[in-house]
Image: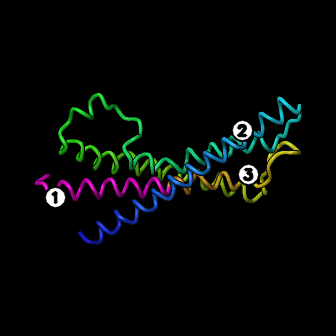
Amino acid sequence: MDTAKKYLRFNDALQEYAGKTAAWLSFLLVLVICIDVFTRYLLSISFVALQELEWHLFAVIFLLAAGYTLRNGEHVRIDVFYQRYSERTRHKLNLWGSALLLIPFAWVMIYYSYDFLMASVSVGERSPEAAGLPARYILKGVIPLSMIVLILEGLAQFTGSFIWLKENGGE
């Protein structure tokens, strides 16, 4: 049990780091958008790389924050039903949902995104626009990384629910 609780503490720190990173990237995204709007509408200058950076940052924020959002109970689920369940039933749902849905889905994403990433790395993929961003494979590398972080949170959800059920007479 001590090892499981150490893992939960490690995962909490990891998810907090990912969440804070996403928060700072959100701040950076707002700055990039402001600069883009200023240069485009006030100076009549447009930068393709700046526009691409906006959606790159948004994608990284979305992907990195997935585990953090799940840990804090902010993921979309059918709360109309979930909130009415007993704590025991919610832990059972979290345990089985993590084991049967979340973790397998994230593994499938890693499996398919790996070849996607390797193909991008092998050709040194960059923006199709001449003035666009180089190294698009970095963005594609965030996909499997974020799924690993999400799996770690899924394992933490599973472990936390298992411990709760064991300590509170669950099955």
When asked about the image quadrant of residue 40, the answer is top right
Residue 93 vs residue 113: left or right? left
Q: Name the one closer to the observer, 63 or 14.
A: 14
Q: Which residues are magenta?
A: 148-171
Task: Give percent across and percent down for residue 39.
Answer: 83, 36
Q: Is residue 113 magenta?
A: no
Residue drawn at (15%, 59%) of the image: 167
Q: Residue furthest bottom?
A: 3
Neighbour tally class for label 3: few under 14, some 14-19, many 20 plus, Cα within 10 Å: some
Q: Which amino acid, by three-letter code, is at mark 1?
A: Lys
State whether the magenta stretch is mostly helix, strand or loop: helix
CA–CA distance between discs 3 and 2? 20 Å
Magenta residue check for 161 = yes
Q: Which residue is mark 1?
A: 166
- Which numbered disc, 3 or 1, marks the residue that appears first in the sequence? 3
Report the coloring of the rendering.
rainbow
- Could you tell me which residue is drawn at 26 percent across and 43 percent down? 93
Of label 3 and label 2, which has the lower sequence position? 2
Q: Secondary structure at mark 3?
A: helix
In this rendering, which labeled residue sits more in front, label 2 or label 1?
Answer: 2
Crowding at label 1, few (<14), some or many (≥20) Cα neighbours within 10 Å? few
* Marking on residue 33: 2
Residue 168 pos. (x, y %): 13, 54
- Where 157 falls versus 37 (above or below)? below
